[in-house]
Image (cartoon, rainbow, N blue to C red):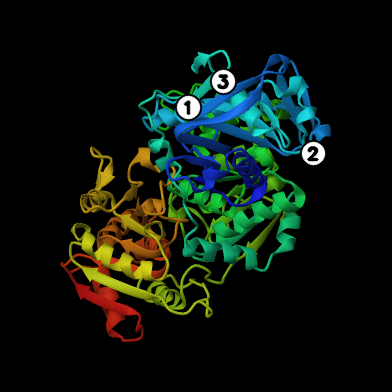
């Protein structure tokens, strides 16, 4: 069989369709073969590598040699046999006027730049990153070749009849395979006119690679998100403000701030050809955003002018290396390193001319037209100053989550703003407010508002329920939910009947449930023992990996849940997390000499609780212990009032 997996939009997908047609032209039976498999994967993501994405990965594994004829010298025909192969392909859709060849290298120029970039170096970087990525997956006996596909060139436009790794829209498949083959001296010469293309040992198969490349169909939840993005009333004025003033998008949990950033970035590219960097501090959110971006068919980085997603730590690390600053013990010295960068800036030992050189020499890292900042309420002043120095004040768009603080103290920020607008003239920035709840179904939004006002004393909670999204339920479970994977299976079966997959489920756990020695959570360990596939981002290593498949349930710590969402969301030992945050708030209130430290602590903890509570779309599962607790009594009181028919309370 022959399949196209991955993204189904954009120029890369069209290139994959072209290649599929070429393969079927020479091997018409391949489409129905049960013994042979050829996969063309579009938009292969590698979050553990320096180069994050590859336009196309072609992998073929044939039970028996497939034969093509290739013209040899003097008009003779060579028999070219194909057995197993893997090829990474960089797709270039440049107009012929923006492509040139010199010294065996290919160079391309983007329409908004005078600089020529090396497509050859870019392709080579993809190849090396892919090989490194395969080794990290214990696939280390596989040879990989690389090609550059110029979709707007004819084969006759290529130098030396396409020798090397260049192919064009009219290059025959025999030539494409031969160009890939000649990059290695590992093939077997059976006889002078017979060559077998087999990039692995005879007993090796590509099943491990195919497993990694397993197709992830957009789930119904993903489609709903995509439909929401496509049908949302587009705020054109917001887009027109980019480059003229800093934009601050404000809204509480569930109002769609992150989706708004993705919408703006996508439109900025498609309408104005602006390349964007979306930056956050949350590694779990980076994985989720990359998944969302892939499902939207949005390209990465400079390759096609799309959206690159990164953490602030990654950006600062790259800048540190460029500036020659000592990066030893990077994470423990993070604050000192940022301040050292700013010392160089203020002393003008590095200038804007240096920044321009960074952009020219490392465009994938620094050459962006717009920077979108997620969870801007948490950014300290030194990071804000560095971003403005690198990219310019007017090229920054910030999503500001009201009452959603993770990295800084809640009490350190006044209600009227934070470092993003402090000290700026009124015409230098603009605030855009989001009030409508776009994530939660109506019942959940009403329940959350009640909890915010009457339990957490958050009297400024102002999210308007979405009347068009009817339904939603709250399930409160007393007992040891972590040891009951059968409850997950029960609720997943219900979600599955509505067209969802495990990846549409999200579990949040408190810190005490994380076993550092095992690099996993108690929930993740119990789920795996019960045969449930998990992406347990409680492990630093796992957080950096791409979500493996739609059959994987996501597990994160409470403090990493912001920005994520799920059809069904499990909040394990919600009371323990409340106790932890209440005690933190009490200490902070006392240190600030607040007149009512208990009230301060309740609001502090409440702001934290609203973050994981607002992750759910349809079903919110709140897990409490059997023992008595303040938060349990508060929730029970709301339940007994009988004003929320959506609440079901039961003991395990």
The answer to whether one can see residue 286 in this image is yes
Residue at screen point 41% across, 73% down: 448
Quick check: can you spot residue 389?
A: no
Is residue 269 shown above or below 633? above
The percent position of residue 254, horizontal first and vertical second, equals 49, 65
Q: Residue at x 63, y 30 (%)?
A: 174
Residue that sits furthest to the front in the current view: 76
Left or right of 635 on screen, residue 301: right
**Disc 1 to disc 2, C-alpha distance:** 32 Å
Residue 310 falls left or right of residue 498:
right
Residue on which disc 1 sits: 131
Give the numbered dot on residue 324. Answer: 3
- Nearer the observer: mark 1 or 2; the answer is 1
Dot 2 lies on which element?
loop
Residue that sits furthest to the left in the current view: 627
Residue 32 lies, with reference to residue 181, above or below; the image says below
Circle 3 or circle 2, nearest the eye: 2
Q: Residue furthest right?
A: 97
Q: Which mark is residue 42?
A: none
Give the Cα distance between marks 3 and 2.
30 Å
Q: Which quadrant would the C terminus be assigned to in this image?
A: bottom left
Q: Which badge, 3 or 2, comes first in the chain's sequence?
A: 2
Mark 2 lies on residue: 112
Pointer 3 and pointer 2: residues touching (CB < 8 Å)? no
Q: Kindly report the distance in space between the C-alpha atoms of the residues bearing marks 3 and 1.
A: 28 Å
**Mark 3 Cα shell of 10 Å, populated few (<14), some (14-19), many (≥20):** few
SS class, disc 3: loop
Sequence order check, earlier mark of 1 and 2: 2
Of badges 3 and 1, the one in the foreground is: 1
Secondary element under disc 1, as helix, strand or loop, is helix
């Amino acid at each position: 069989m022959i399949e196209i997996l991955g993204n189904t939009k954009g120029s890369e997908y069209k290139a994959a369709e072209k290649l599929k047609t070429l393969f079927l032209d020479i091997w018409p039976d391949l489409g129905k073969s049960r013994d042979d498999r050829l996969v063309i994967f579009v938009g292969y993501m590698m979050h553990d590598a320096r180069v994050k994405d590859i336009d196309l990965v072609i992998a073929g594994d044939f039970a028996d040699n497939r034969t093509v004829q290739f013209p040899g010298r003097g008009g003779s025909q060579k028999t070219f046999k194909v057995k197993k192969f893997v090829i990474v392909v960089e797709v270039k859709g440049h107009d012929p006027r923006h492509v040139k060849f010199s010294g065996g290298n290919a160079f391309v120029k983007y329409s908004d730049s005078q600089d020529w970039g090396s497509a050859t170096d870019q392709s080579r970087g993809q190849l090396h990153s892919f090989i490194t990525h395969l080794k990290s997956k214990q696939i280390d006996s596989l040879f990989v070749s690389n090609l550059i596909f110029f979709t707007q060139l004819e084969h006759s436009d290529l130098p030396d009849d396409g020798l090397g790794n260049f192919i064009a829209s009219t290059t025959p498949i025999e030539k494409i395979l031969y160009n890939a083959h000649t990059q290695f001296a590992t093939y077997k010469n059976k006889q002078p006119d017979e060559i077998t293309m087999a990039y692995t040992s005879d007993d090796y198969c590509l099943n491990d690679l195919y497993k990694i490349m397993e197709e992830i169909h957009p789930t119904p939840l993903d489609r709903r998100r995509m439909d929401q993005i496509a049908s949302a009333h587009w705020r054109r004025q917001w887009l027109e403000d980019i480059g003229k003033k800093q934009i601050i998008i404000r809204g509480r949990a569930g109002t769609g701030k992150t989706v708004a950033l993705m919408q703006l970035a996508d439109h900025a590219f498609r309408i104005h050809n602006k390349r964007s960097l979306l930056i956050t501090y949350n590694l779990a959110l980076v994985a989720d955003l990359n998944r969302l971006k892939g499902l939207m068919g949005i390209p990465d980085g400079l390759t096609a002018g799309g959206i690159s997603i990164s953490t602030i730590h990654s950006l600062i690390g790259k800048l540190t290396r460029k500036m020659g600053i000592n990066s030893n013990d990077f994470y423990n010295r993070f604050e000192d390193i940022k301040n050292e960068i700013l010392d160089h800036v203020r002393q003008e030992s590095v200038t804007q001319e240096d920044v321009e050189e960074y952009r020219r020499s490392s465009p994938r890292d620094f050459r962006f037209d717009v920077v979108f900042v997620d969870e801007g309420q948490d950014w300290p002043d030194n990071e804000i100053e560095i971003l403005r120095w690198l990219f310019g004040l007017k090229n920054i768009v910030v999503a500001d989550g009201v009452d959603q603080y993770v990295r800084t103290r809640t009490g350190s920020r006044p209600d009227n703003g934070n470092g993003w607008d402090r000290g700026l003239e009124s015409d230098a920035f603009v605030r855009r407010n989001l009030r409508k709840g776009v994530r939660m179904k109506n019942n959940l939004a009403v329940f959350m508002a009640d909890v915010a006002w009457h339990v957490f004393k958050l009297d400024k909670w102002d999210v308007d329920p979405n009347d068009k999204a009817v339904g939603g339920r709250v399930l409160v479970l007393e007992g040891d939910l972590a040891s009951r994977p059968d409850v997950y299976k029960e609720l997943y079966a219900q979600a599955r009947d509505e067209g969802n997959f495990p990846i549409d489920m999200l579990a949040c756990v408190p810190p005490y449930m994380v076993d550092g020695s095992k690099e996993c959570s108690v929930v993740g360990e119990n789920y795996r023992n019960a045969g449930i596939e998990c992406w347990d981002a409680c492990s630093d290593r796992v957080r950096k990996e791409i979500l493996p498949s739609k059959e994987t349930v996501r597990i994160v710590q409470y403090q990493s849940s912001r920005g994520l969402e799920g059809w069904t969301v499990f909040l394990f030992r919600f009371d323990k997390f409340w106790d932890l945050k209440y005690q933190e708030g009490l200490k902070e209130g006392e240190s600030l000499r607040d007149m009512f430290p208990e009230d301060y602590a309740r609001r502090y903890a409440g702001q934290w609780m609203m973050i994981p509570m607002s992750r759910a779309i349809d079903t919110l599962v709140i897990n409490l212990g059997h023992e008595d607790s303040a938060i349990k009594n508060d929730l029970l009181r709301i339940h007994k009032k009988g004003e929320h028919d959506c609440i079901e309370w039961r003991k395990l």
